[in-house]
Amino acid sequence: MRRTSSRNLFLTTELLEIGRPLVVVLNMSDEARERGLIIDHARLARRLGVPVIPAVGNRNQGMDELVGAVLDVATARAHLPGTADMCRDQGPGPGSLAMPQRASRDGRVDYGPAVEGAVARIEAMLPESPHRRWQALKLLEGDQQVFGSAPVEADRPAINAIAAAFAASTTDDPDVHLARLRYEHIGRLCGEVVRQVGAGRGTVVSDRIDRLAMHQVWGVPLFLALMYGVFAITFSLGNPLMDLIDRGFGWLGGAITGLWPEGSSSHLQSLLVDGIIGGVGGVVVFLPNIVLLFLAIAVLEGTGYMARAAFVMDRFMSKVGLHGKTFIPLLIGFGCTVPAIMATRTLETRRDRLITMMVLPLMSCGARLPIYALMIPAFFAPQWQGPVLWIIYVTGIVLAMLGARLLRATLFRGENTPFVMELPPYRLPTARSLAIQMWTRAWLYLKKAGTVILGAAIILWCLTFYPKPREGWVPPAGDSLPAGVPYEQLTDPAQQQAAALSYSVAGRVGRVMEPLIAPLGFDWRIGTALVGATAAKEVFVAQMGIVFAVGEADETSEQLREQLRARYSPLVGLCIMMFALIATPCIATFAITRQESGSVRWALAQSLGLTALAWVVTFAVFQVGMLLKLGGMGS
């Protein structure tokens, strides 16, 4: 606790030197008492020369006193001469108020004769200002930014000479030397105002828990067990709610469809049902899992355990140039990439955040499961289905780790940031803080669903809906359609839908893509489905059902599996899953990456880079499989 106070008071002393109005708040003062710490608030206020307010923020204790102190400082009443009667001390508990007796800056750091003499000489060259002492200290350190802003051009040679003489007299850099002197001052101050009475009940309990939570052997299994519990609870509670939302959007789509005569075709109807409701509903349906997942993470963070988990996992994550904290977003990515990217906000440096964002889509999210659930039973015997799924997931993990290492060594070169983390005390989070965190994450997700994702869903609907086949157009033979039959003579709605998709922009893009994706074992049908899957990965299954004219299909459709087995080999099925695992993420991921990175360039780099990587990996898998004569295209 004393080390924590020293770190916080370091900033306080700097702010005092700047000369800004200041109020010191000792939050979590109840936990200090539980740890056996007695803080003399009144004496600390006198030594610093500013109001000191003990408080317990999560219980609103000390808030009235804090507001009063802020008002006093803002109106300068707390610093007027002759205000000795303003020192009010109601005891060491929360809600007491300690105010300075006089306006003198007792909290000013005494750096010793050598430093104080140099500072005084520099101060004499500066114009009168509340923060003149701070400027003098920075100029003594040789801070070029202050040199550029302070009006000292005429005296620059003299100031440089004083700073050079000071630097020559110290064994450390000037800024390091001054920081050490400031910490020595803070240490003496803490010794005057803080008393330790026993070990404290909270410290004993915390130490006992940490013996297990941070154990070199048992720490990792405990963390993995807790994460398993988090995911089990999230999906067991979230899936019924997801089904409810899905049925709600289905009912809404059916209600809107009922506004048109049965059997009629309307562009507006398709836009509303297939484009807007289908596109946005496919994203909003994941909201329960996102809310529950972030609730569980908020609980772990609020209790103080997440900091311990980051420490435990740092030994592994540091091998790929990342911190232990990055393990949490990567783990969330197995559920959904969108909240995982949002979770990178817990990382301190922008470099770590960007590296983690770039590789997060390689964690196989839940939206890819329908593709695996369709392909694996279609091409692999029961005894191979588990190992194949394991291979897919492990491939994503390995590529993510290698990708993070590569990015760390190229685009994000630099020294590793030391892993320094203050372990917070164990505590029970308040319901209010948990509710705020859940609402914030849910609102951000819904906001994207109603803006960027909605716009992208409409664009993708246009690509798969327009243009409509012209009169007399005959679909190409071998497309699950009767040979030589014009479009308008097709009576089966599923065949009409398949022909219309083939004629649409998405179908044409699929055909244009065919020479590019042929080395992967793919044809235009797979290319067309991949275009549609840009909206959401699971849409790939529905698009394949349309292409093969089996009507509305899901991952359990045996008819679609038969069509796939008749046309493709198990090697192609494996390549489809590999490509879906690695290639460009869904539009929701693109949107959230753009938001969290602050630039569309990083979102584009992520999409294009992962697509290029998917092509290379899938090409290697298919070509090696062909060399081993594992089979290519079917009939």
Image: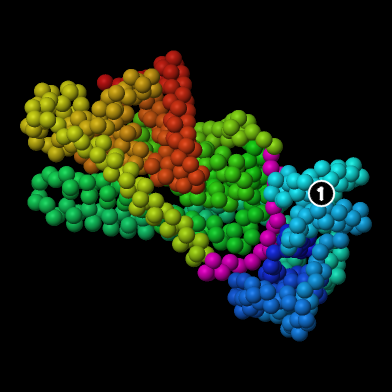
Magenta part, dominant SS: loop
Tell which residue pokes out farthest to the front in this image: 154
Rendered residue at 47%/37% (across/down): 601
Q: Nearer the viewer, residue 148 or 108?
A: 148
Q: Is residue 14 magenta?
A: no
* Quadrant in the picture for residue 503: top left
- What is the total number of numbered labels drawn onto the structure image? 1
Residue 337 at least partly seen = no
Q: Which residue is mark 1?
A: 140
Q: Tell me the quarter of the image containing the C terminus.
A: top left
Rendered residue at 81%/53% (across/down): 125
Q: Secondary structure at mark 1?
A: helix
Check disc 1: other Cα within 10 Å, few if <14, some if 14-19, many if 20+: many
| 547 relative position to 77: left or right | left
Q: Tell me the quarter of the image containing the N terminus.
A: bottom right
| Disc 1 residue type (three-letter) | Leu
User: Is 161 above or below relative to 81?
Assistant: above
Q: Is residue 420 magenta?
A: yes
Give the residues in magenta: 416-433
Residue 124: % across, % down: 83, 56
Residue 381: % across, % down: 39, 32
Rendered residue at 33%/43% (across/down): 456
Rendered residue at 69%/42% (across/down): 417
Identify the image's colour scheme: rainbow, by chain, secondary structure or one colour.
Answer: rainbow
Q: Nearer the viewer, residue 189 or 398?
A: 189
Residue 308: % across, % down: 66, 54
User: Is 562 above or below relative to 310?
Assistant: above
Residue 348: % across, % down: 62, 49
* Quadrant in the picture for residue 536: top left
Residue 536 at least partly seen = yes
